[in-house]
Image (spheres, rainbow, N blue to C red):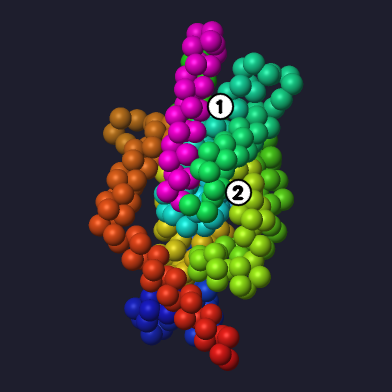
């Protein structure tokens, strides 16, 4: 931010006391981007608000049609995308933190598919007995427990966990497909649309449960973040610093499962966000160790930007955002695997570990 300030003319440069600190600068930049994306949500498209209509809306004298466009058609969809993206980003950071592996996201280890299976069962066979949100959350938790027990040693060995997660993902996907064959034609068509992942048509009543879940888990996320950063140093160091490894992993996994399940119940399975947001947050914030809140902010921006791109930028017309993110997720996964094959990710992990260990020893000596 300070470097950007120096590029401005001297008459327009901000006073140094008005510039945000280095720690807050990414959040300020994210807020500006979020504001721009929200304005884009209101104004893009052939039926978007004009500049005059936006001015009327800000001044409080908009017509009923302009209010309907803003508060019924555009803003609920945008805020649902922000909230679901935040939940997916935090969930990805929690799971990547406890596994110390950038591939350990809910997409890869089968939690998203397990949540989809739970939501599909609740909305088709258990209708009236269990809500879709509860079914998705239960599916994600059962998937988490299956990965935990299937890997043999819990989340302590990332490679075993990834293999167990791929197996759970395959089983859950088979369950989804089997369930689709049992549904009627109309129900199966609706289920297929939901399984593609989309925020189209979402309203305020879709936002409140997801927002409530995020606010409920926010204190736990803030409390667990420092422990995850200590766990990034390795189990012996974290244990010597007083971290209860088993309890921290279990708490992180439960919060991550609830957030992934809630997001799936609200917008369907959406790939890429929980995989990429934690890694992008590490590069933007330039700090070692998992950053759940920063990953949530990046995830929110990613999902809203992807939804706008899926609506207005593709020449083929509007697509469900899950289709676009699935394609981006596949490309990003190949990129991660190539980096891991060349040994760059372990080197990055070693660099982060060396930096944190050096910081810990300097504090101890002081």
As for residue 182 lying within the magenta part, the answer is yes
Q: Which residues are magenta?
A: 158-187
Q: Is residue 171 visible?
A: yes
Q: Secondary structure at mark 1?
A: helix
Q: Name the residue that disc number 1 marks.
A: 117
Residue found farthest to the front: 152
315 relative to 154 in the view: left or right: left
- For the C terminus, the quadrant is bottom right
Q: Is residue 18 above or below residue 201?
A: below
Residue 184: quadrant of the picture: top right
Local crowd size for mark 2, using a 10 Å CA cut-off: few (<14), some (14–19), many (≥20): many
Q: Is residue 250 above or below residue 322?
A: below
User: Residue at horizontal 43%, vertical 37%?
Assistant: 166
Residue 329 versus residue 117: which sits nearer the camera? 117
Residue 56 location in percent, x, y?
Answer: 57, 48
Residue 126 location in percent, x, y?
Answer: 68, 19
Residue 110 location in percent, x, y?
Answer: 49, 37
Q: Secondary structure at mark 2?
A: helix
Q: Is residue 202 visible?
A: no
Q: Answer yes or no: do the residues labelled 2 and 1 have beta carbons within 8 Å?
A: no
Q: Is residue 195 above or below residue 101?
A: above
Residue 78 is marked as none
Q: CA distance from mark 2 to mark 1?
A: 19 Å
Residue 125 location in percent, x, y?
Answer: 64, 16
Q: Name the residue that disc number 2 marks.
A: 253
Q: Earlier in the sequence, mark 2 or mark 1?
A: 1
- For the N terminus, the quadrant is bottom left
Residue found farthest to the top: 184
């Amino acid at each position: 931010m300070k470097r950007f300030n120096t590029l401005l003319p001297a008459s327009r440069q901000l006073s140094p006391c008005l510039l945000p600190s280095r720690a807050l600068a990414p959040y300020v930049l994210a807020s500006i981007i979020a504001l721009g994306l929200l304005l884009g949500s209101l104004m893009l498209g052939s039926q978007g608000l004009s500049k005059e209509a936006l001015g009327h809306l800000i001044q409080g004298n908009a017509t009923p049609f302009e209010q309907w466009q803003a508060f019924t058609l555009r803003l609920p969809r945008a805020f649902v995308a922000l909230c679901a993206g935040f939940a997916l980003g935090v969930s990805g950071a929690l799971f990547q933190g406890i596994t110390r592996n950038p591939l350990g996201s809910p997409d890869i280890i089968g939690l998203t598919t397990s949540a989809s299976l739970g939501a599909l069962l609740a909305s088709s066979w258990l209708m009236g007995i269990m809500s879709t949100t509860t079914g998705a959350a239960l599916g994600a938790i059962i998937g988490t427990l299956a990965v935990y027990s299937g890997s043999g040693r819990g989340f302590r060995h990332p490679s075993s966990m990834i293999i167990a997660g791929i197996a759970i993902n395959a089983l859950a996907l088979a369950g989804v497909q089997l369930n689709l064959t049992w549904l009627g034609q109309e129900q199966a068509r609706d289920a297929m649309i939901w399984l593609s992942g989309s925020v189209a048509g979402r309203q305020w009543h879709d936002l409140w449960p997801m927002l409530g879940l995020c606010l409920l888990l926010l204190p736990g996320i803030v409390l667990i973040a420092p422990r995850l950063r200590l766990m990034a140093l390795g189990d012996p160091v974290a244990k010597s610093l007083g971290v209860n490894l088993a309890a921290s992993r279990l708490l992180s996994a439960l919060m991550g499962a609830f957030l992934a399940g809630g997001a799936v119940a609200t917008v369907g399975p959406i790939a890429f966000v929980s995989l990429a947001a934690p890694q992008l947050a590490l590069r933007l914030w330039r700090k070692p160790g998992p950053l759940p809140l920063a990953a949530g902010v990046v995830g929110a921006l990613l999902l809203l930007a992807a939804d706008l791109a899926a609506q207005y930028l593709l020449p083929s017309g509007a697509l469900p955002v899950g289709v676009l993110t699935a394609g981006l997720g596949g490309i990003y996964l190949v990129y991660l695997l190539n980096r891991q094959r060349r040994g760059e990710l372990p080197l990055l992990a070693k660099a982060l570990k060396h930096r944190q260990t050096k910081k810990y020893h300097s504090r101890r000596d002081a």
